[in-house]
Amino acid sequence: MIEKILEHNQAFFANKSYIPYQTGKYPSKKLAILTCMDTRLTELLPAALGLRGGNVKMIKNAGGMISDPFETSVRSLLIAVLELGVEEIMVIGHTDCGVCGMESKTLIRHLTERGISPAAISGITYNGIDLYHWLTGFDQVEDSVRSSVDILQNHPLMPSDVSIYGFVIDTQTGKLNPVD
């Protein structure tokens, strides 16, 4: 697969197909979006929101969630606010998310099945990482969005003039629903 991607990239470059995608590093809509890495959202979310390249800073992770106030997603959002002119943040979860109902015990079992030793897993816990919390999903997407918005709104480093909103997008229709 990688070889085919690299071949395509060479043709893309040779044909100067990159020209329509050139834009600046500052988001024109002064907006950042934290959302899920789900493949269904790759084209659906920008289309449903009327976004084009250069409009927003898009941060994606598994579940589109913040599980810790000092994780890399929060760091990325703070940089977007402090250095790239972002004034508003949207946290967008989605229906039928794979992280919904995800259990850490299952993921840890998958780790051992893939050859990760129990000693390596124990070592992570010994070094202060709560692996069970880190690998846990959520029960309701709306609750996850609410929690992420709350973490951002109450973050000690997030400027108070940044507006933060929560939504759930339907992966079938693209309909965006606000989360109170």
Image (spheres, rainbow, N blue to C red):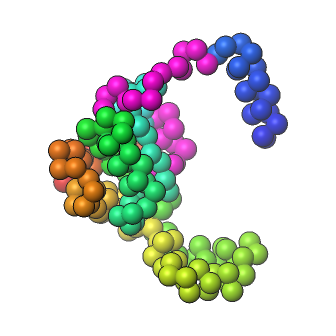
Position of 97 with respect to 158 (left or right) is: right
Which residue in the rendered view is the most extreme toward the front?
Answer: 83
Q: Position of residue 72 (x, y in %)?
A: 46, 56
Q: Which residue is drawn at 36% across and 36% down?
A: 84
Q: Where is residue 70 in the image (x, y as percent from the top left)?
A: 39, 63
Q: Position of residue 68 (x, y in %)?
A: 38, 66
User: Quadrant location of the N terminus?
Assistant: top right
Residue 150 part of the magenta segment: no
Q: Residue at x 48, y 21 (%)?
A: 23
Q: Residue at x 72, y 76 (%)?
A: 116
Position of 56 with respect to 142 (left or right) is: right
Between residue 15 and residue 76, name the one nearer to us: 76
- 109 vs 39: above or below: below
Position of 161 with respect to 55 (left or right) is: left
Q: Position of residue 172 (x, y in %)?
A: 43, 41
Residue 27 part of the magenta segment: yes
- 168 vs 131: above or below: above
User: Quadrant location of the C terminus?
Assistant: bottom left
- Specify whether residue 173 is in view: no
Q: Which residue is drawn at 54% across and 20% down?
A: 21
Between residue 73 and residue 26, name the one nearer to us: 26
- Specify whether residue 122 is in view: yes
| Segment tinted magenta in the rendering | 18-44
